[in-house]
Amino acid sequence: MSQSFRISGGLIDRSSPMHFTFNGKRMEGYAGDTLASALLANGQKLVGRSFKYHRPRGILSAGPEEPNALVQLRTGAAQEPNTRATVAELFDGLSATSQNHRGSLEFDLMAITDLAAPFLSAGFYYKTFMWPKAFWEKLYEPMIRASAGLGTLSMKEDPDTYDKGFLHCDLLIIGAGPSGLIAALTAARSGARVILADEDFRLGGRLNSETFALDDMEGGIWAEQVAAELQSLSNVRIMTRTTVYGAYDHGVFGALERVTDHLKSSGGKPRQILWRIYSKRSLLCAGATERPIAFSNNDRPGIMLAGAVRSYVNRFGVAPGKNVTVFTNNDDGWRTASDLIAKGVTVRALIDVRDGVSPPDLYGTEVITGGRIIDTAGRKALSSITLKNGRKITTDCLAVSGGWNPTVHLTCHQRGKPVWNEDILAFVPSGVLPEGMRVAGAANGVFGLSSALQGASEVTAGILTDLGMSSKAAALPVAEDEAQSGIAFWHVKESKKRAWVDLQNDVTVKDIKLSYQEGFRSVEHLKRYSTLGMATDQGKTSNIAGLAILAECSGKTISETGTTIFRPPYTPVPIGALAGRARGKDFRPYRLTPSHRWAEANGATFVETGNWMRAQWFARAGEKGWRDSVDREVEMTRASVGICDVTTLGKIDIQGKDAAEFLNHVYTNAFLKLPVGKVRYGLMLREDGIAYDDGTTARLGENHFVMTTTTANAVLVFRRLEFARQCLWPNLDVHLISTTDGWAQFAVAGPNARNLLAKVVDAPFDLSNEAFPFMACAEVSVCGGTPARLFRISFSGELAYEIAVPAKYGNSMMDVLMKAGAEFNAVPYGTEALGVMRIEKGHAAGNELNGQTTALNLGLGGFVSSKKDCIGKTLSQRPELNLPDAIRLVGFKPVNSSDALLAGSHFITKGDAATMENDQGWMSSVAYSPTLGHSIGLGFIKRGHERMGEVVRVVNPARGVEVEAEIVSPHFYDPEGGLQRG
Amino acid sequence: MRYSGFKVFLEGLTGNRGWKPAWRDPEPKSDYDVIIIGGGGHGLSTAYYLSKVYGVRNVAVLEKGWLGSGNIGRNTTIIRSNYMLPGNEPFYEFSLKLWEGLEQDFNYNAMISQRSILNLFHSDPQRDAFVRRANAMMLAGADAELADEAQLRRELPFLDFDNARFPIKGGLFQRRGGTVRHDAVAWGYARGADAEGVDIIQNCEVTGFQIENGICKGVQTTKGAINAKKIAVCVAGSSGRVMAMAGMRLPIESHVLQAFVSEGLKPVLPGVITFGAGHFYVSQSDKGGLVFGGDIDAYNSYAQRGNLPVVEDVAEGGMAIMPMIGRARLLRSWGGIMDMSMDGSPFIDKTHIGGLYFNGGWCYGGFKATPASGYCYAHLLAKDEPHPVATEMRLDRFKRGHLIDEKGQGNQPNLH
Amino acid sequence: MIINHPLLGPRDAAEFVYLGDESLIERPDPNAPDAADRFYEYGYLRDNPAGEHKELWYHEQGDRSWLVVTRNTITHQITHVELARDVARAKGRDR
């Protein structure tokens, strides 16, 4: 079987033979083939199995509307399910397998469902599989799931890469058929920046599939000439293999360019590029899609769309059959017969459903008018058809034309609803189009070639005028309007057996009638109940016939019946392409702290903190686990001195005459009177009165403050401050800038912190407690002149400082601090030790400031000034946020000191059952305290401040553990604060 | 007409000629005891329980389009009760229990599939929050199961454990969570309510309320005026528009949430999986499509469609945790209008207008609530007091300061 | 979507962060006798119109301007963009 169906002519390159396999069978085609045309050339009619009944299926179409010929392309991790053979370009070495069958394609064991078809009518599954109850999940559903689905994912990571790109243009032209080409030529010659995109790998659209003449040239040649001129113009970007899949707001389009899908290997290039195209105007020239006619057993391999047959014959040089029959309800179908005959293919008969029509002379080919096909035969390939009068015609290919539907999809993506046009018996775009869009050619319901060219030219001139450009119209080629009249004829009513409407989902005329009978009478009900139009082709060939049959049932017009809505994407888009490079480690950018390199070199284990990577602990030789390292870091810090990179805390520089007043608005506590050279803790609420963020703010000058925020809220607080500044208090003289990345900041904590810093901070700065007490700040210099900021603040509870230097010195600063600290046995500590020390100290952090707790809950009620307003104050006073049994943040210590407390545990009063009604609160943060030698926790419990000393149940059913803990002060370590002030 | 496998068999033998319409297509009467505005999932389930459980049968459901055309027809079909707060968790657990017996109750196979839901976590603070949640669920009598990384590697080997930007540290399973065939829920409730005598009136849009002296006595519709003792609004996605006709402003903003389905694939995913370090959740339908979604588009919208940045963000989330879906294709995307409330939790309550009731503000969590929402709304309508599991879902809670804020995002609806 | 920034010209909406109704500019007077009610309404009640909506967007990936964008919530068409600060001043917000 070597291309026995190949005939002469076509736009394929016979000098480039290509080998491929289908289900392991070796076959040959040519460059310029699609997989479908190559399969047909090799006489492979059976290509797949249908979704529900596992019926043998072949190739219906020659384009993206294909419902039947879905294959798995490529192998291994690159296996790509559900690929339409009709749009897959052939390449040498291509490997395809059929899908959705058990056993071989030829002998699919699942085809047994076809025999049960009478019991599997539309929606049957809603009425059964309910007894016994447990059987749905154990038996029925797994059975259904196994037989459902189509292709198979490899379950391996997609080996290809995908890019994203952004393009801008004056005019995006979607579709490079005759209308698109003439529009592009007009716009391009007029100087507009044009993008011409077409899903095909060859420009010309239907011109490549037809025998039309333009200016006495073959259509394909004319298209080549226009394409050549367009290629030569610098203001035109031609994008072949590019599907514009979605129309979004304000002239933005999504487009998918298949860069290497036509190659055996991507060769390191991105497989596809997802383009976002920003257009001032767009012109949809997407053409039209042919629709079949439903009749008994109209789904057999060999039954094809008539226009597709012309594509295979004229473009690909393939005869889809040796003895072809044509069945049509319109003049367009006639051309399939004449084109076949012109190529020397036998046409058994031209059957027109219409009476009294006279097709042109077809060299004696039999013409049957008023004909009806009522059945077909041939299990795996069509062998014959039967007419209403009982006559059987032997044929191996039936070309069917039920008329054409304008490809209006993109006009609907912003909820525009197409309108029924009785003249052409199809839906055309309504007046409600996406912003900036116009439609031309067949997509606009203009089917004649000459009229389409003229219309496209005119609409382009209008667009150019709109854009303020003068139109230099391209001369229209001489062409004719082909015969195209037809009648509304959707299905052969005399059919006794199943007549398919939606081929992929196996929805038949009977299913549609049954849906109607059962009350599913809106088009949307029909779709959802019968699954009409919900397959991978989204009903491109089935929707209109389906709703026409529904209209028949209800006695309404198609116009009254309406249509379902087209949604993006126009054709399916790989999820990998939509994600682009943002996957794996590149899912989100990394933010590295200034001392990251130092930490890496010194054994740090890192942890993701938002997009930051922070040192979590620094393991030393001999340590058996993270706890060893963390305990040591805490102990050594508390014993002498520890250093931690705290750059990730948000830093906001606030300057202006009204900076202090501004802070007074955004913090609960007062800042007006904060002296220069001092730092104050500040608490921020959301406007709804819930605690939002906290941090310290230093007054470096009369009109200059530096605020710190939590790491998690750095961006959000800045955003809120800008809102307050621009929208709430727009006349304050205050300016903000985020300096989080500008300054590297280190905590230096422990009894030897001052001694260490004395070696680093330039003289004559006086670090003594008298000159630079707790909560002092200053601009200093370090290491002989490097500018720095010094804050005497403590998160650990120790004598502590934070020192900031310009970020570029951060890594060196860490080095300097560690070297200066060597004599004190200084230790770097990570986020775990930081966390342990803050829990020992009873400071709230993210687990406590979780957006659900108030200042009162946090024990910070005293920080809400009664003397002034601030964001959130009024709503924080709502009664049920201030109930007597409100939760309070307290400390917990296990009654049995060897018990570990676990975060996320809930508190139950002793003697009460562990139920939600009795829930008293939850444990928010826990740590093993090396300082105290046991587990400690912070948590919220109702009336906690009044329950000191009470022992409660700490229940954790999810972990299967329960312990008892005593409610204690949250300030486990140095509750008087003497150390940090020392 | 009772549905059964036997009936399907018999009908199959006789050409399926005996199937009757699933519901009547009545014209509205002039008076009802209760009018339910909105023939979506919640409205239909309200009608069903009102008639079946509470015996109130002189009821009309008014639907401006086709029944089930709202969010019941455009969601990602997930059911679960993995909530944390006392104002929510008992309600959602009640709902999950109703789901568990629903098909037998209304004699319709809605393909309720307790395939499990898994919330992945990627950091210690996230783990702590999930432990808190798991414990809350268990205290309320729901099921919860914490899984560590090793267990997830065994159960879901296709997740990206080794090359992830945000490593998977574990997850919270609710094994009783899962998916349901969403349209079938609307149809099952409609059929059940219709059988109890409820008039479901499609293509009947409410154009105004008839309010006299602070009492709502009926509605104007495109099919004429209809009177009722009680008017129950239940119009997710249109709450603002409908209640504005009664002169009410709501603690709600309407936003668009996009949802996505891939081409059909042979079975890949065992249950529902949600990503904890990005916006992505996914399940696989019985037909084989991956059904997935992410974050809302974040701006007020009634457009039922979204934009590209969210589409791409969702795909990135998917590829980040399961890079084997790269070659699966997105088949269809759509948008639903979410009535996002100010604390992310809903309302089932009377209004200050006599006889006028409101159910709404379900954010993007309304589907799983469908049975309990209808049950509790029916309870409220029948007894004029809240159902015990819905006592906190009140309209005045913000004024009182009683927030039901699971995510802790405060009064910014697009963050919930 | 594309927002025509009054200072920077057309920018992709993805550069912006959305907040909500323009009324959020009108923070009530905390000293008013009915401040509790006013703040409740300010914080919680929304017109939520289907149609023209004045709303706040923040140019986070840009110049950090807060903008008031007039946009139709049914069609998404944007008809007007202003600096929120100008709007706030025009509304008479002092300080």
Image: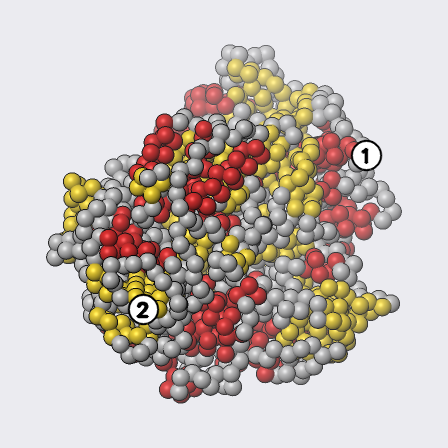
Q: Check the picture and name the quadrant holding the N terminus of chain A.
A: bottom left
Name the subunit of mark 1: C
Name the subunit of mark 2: A
What's the residue at 27%, 47% (across, down)? A315
* Residue on which disc 2 sits: A368
Question: Quadrant of the rendered structure where residue A175 is?
Answer: top left
What's the residue at 43%, 41% (across, down)? A180
What's the residue at 15%, 53% (across, down)? A3
Q: Nearer the viewer, residue B396 or C61?
A: C61
| Viewer can see residue A634 | no
What's the residue at 72%, 79% (across, down)? B29
Q: Residues within 10 Å of mark 1 (few under 14, many from 20)?
A: few
Label 1 is placed on what type of residue? Gly
Q: Position of residue A341 (x, y in %)?
A: 24, 56
Q: Residue furthest left?
A: A1
Asked if the residues shown at circle 1 and circle 2 are in contact, with their CB atoms under 8 angstroms apart, the answer is no
Q: Is residue A152 left or right of residue A792?
A: left
Give above or below for A383 relative to A180.
Answer: below
Q: How is the image coloured?
A: secondary structure
| Viewer can see residue A326 | yes
Q: Position of residue C4 (x, y in %)?
A: 61, 34
Q: Secondary structure at mark 1?
A: loop
Disc 1/disc 2 C-alpha distance (Å)? 82 Å
Q: Position of residue C17 (x, y in %)?
A: 59, 40
Mark 1 vs mark 2: tell me if same chain: no
* Residue on which disc 1 sits: C92
Q: Position of residue A910 (x, y in %)?
A: 60, 66
Q: Residues within 10 Å of mark 2 (few under 14, many from 20)?
A: some
Give above or below for A309 relative to C30.
Answer: below
Label 2 is placed on what type of residue? Ile
Q: Nearer the viewer, residue A813 or A445?
A: A445
